[in-house]
Amino acid sequence: MRLQKYMAKCGVASRRKAEEMIEAGLVKVNGRIVEELGFKVDPDRDIVKVNNKVIRLEEKMVYIMLNKPVGYVTSLKDDKGRRVVTDLIEGVKERIYPVGRLDIDTSGLLILTNDGDLANKLMHPRNEILKKYIAVVEGTPNRAELESFRNGLVIDGRKTAKAYIKVLKRFESDSILDIRIHEGRNRQVKNMCEAINHPVKKLKRVAIGELQLGGLDIGNWRYLDDEELLYLRSL
Ligand code: URA
């Protein structure tokens, strides 16, 4: 990018004014004064100083909800060449990344953003944000199993926090459960269901706090709306 354009994009001055500043010797790239108009900089690599202060591109904050399909890795890239969730998001130039993780065989609500503060707030255990899952499990948990799930189960030597579980539908060989937890341990829902002897066959996340997947089609994404952004800011 041409230096004066970069300066303008960083909000330093108009392009014309930026050119004057360059010619006046006020601008350094990687420690050297550059007086040449049109000098090319790489915004990701070069350090540009104006009046000895580093300038940076202000990225617009973006907040995206994706309905993640099974078969996608929650990551920006994958060593094994598998598909990753950001493959599904086209036309967004900001550098977004997923907030938290869904297993490759889990589908549903995933938030992606370039707002690191928000990512921390949503994931920090202190905030106890409920994540709601719909799970298909083998068999149907009985009353005692549901009770122990609700009270917390010891997994990897540590007890899980109290959780919500309800049987929504029972079939002959499996059942559909509504599960809500606020912790975010690895494979937590699967491990908890396994611990009460009802392994998960299918898992989908449908809500994170007040953010609901609603009717978003599988593999599709959308920007969060104003109401959802207000909710996030209130955290
Ligand atoms: N719990 C799991 O076991 N897997 C997920 O992907 C999310 C929660």
Image (cartoon, rainbow, N blue to C red):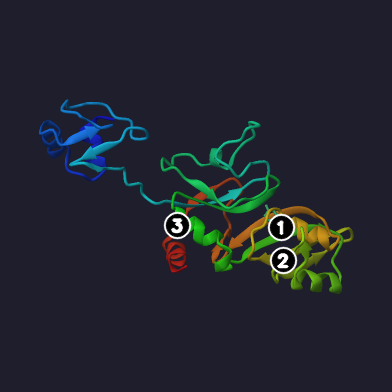
Q: What's the residue type where badge 1 is placed?
A: Gln
- The residue that label 1 is drawn on is 188
Secondary structure, mark 3, is helix
Q: Is mark 1 within 8 Å of ligand 1?
A: yes
Residue drawn at point x = 22 percent, y = 33 percent: 28
- The residue that label 3 is drawn on is 117
Task: Give whichever of 104, 174 is nearer the camera.
Answer: 104
Q: Are marks 1 and 2 in contact (CB under 8 Å)?
A: yes
Q: Is residue 92 above or below residue 107?
A: above
Picture quarter containing residue 191? bottom right
Picture quarter containing residue 233? bottom left
Going by the image, does 116 lie left or right of 38? Answer: right
Residue drawn at point x = 37 percent, y = 35 percent: 44
Secondary structure, mark 2, is loop
Q: Residues within 10 Å of mark 3 (few under 14, many from 20)?
A: few
- The residue that label 2 is drawn on is 160
Q: What's the residue type where badge 3 is placed?
A: Asp
Residue drawn at point x = 64 percent, y = 41 percent: 72
Q: Are marks 1 and 3 in contact (CB under 8 Å)?
A: no
Q: Is mark 2 within 8 Å of ligand 1?
A: no
Q: What's the residue type where badge 2 is placed?
A: Thr
Residue drawn at point x = 57 percent, y = 36 percent: 77
* Residue 17 image label: none
Q: Position of residue 192 (x, y in %)?
A: 77, 61
Question: How far apart in space, not on screen, are marks 1 and 2 (Cα)?
Answer: 9 Å
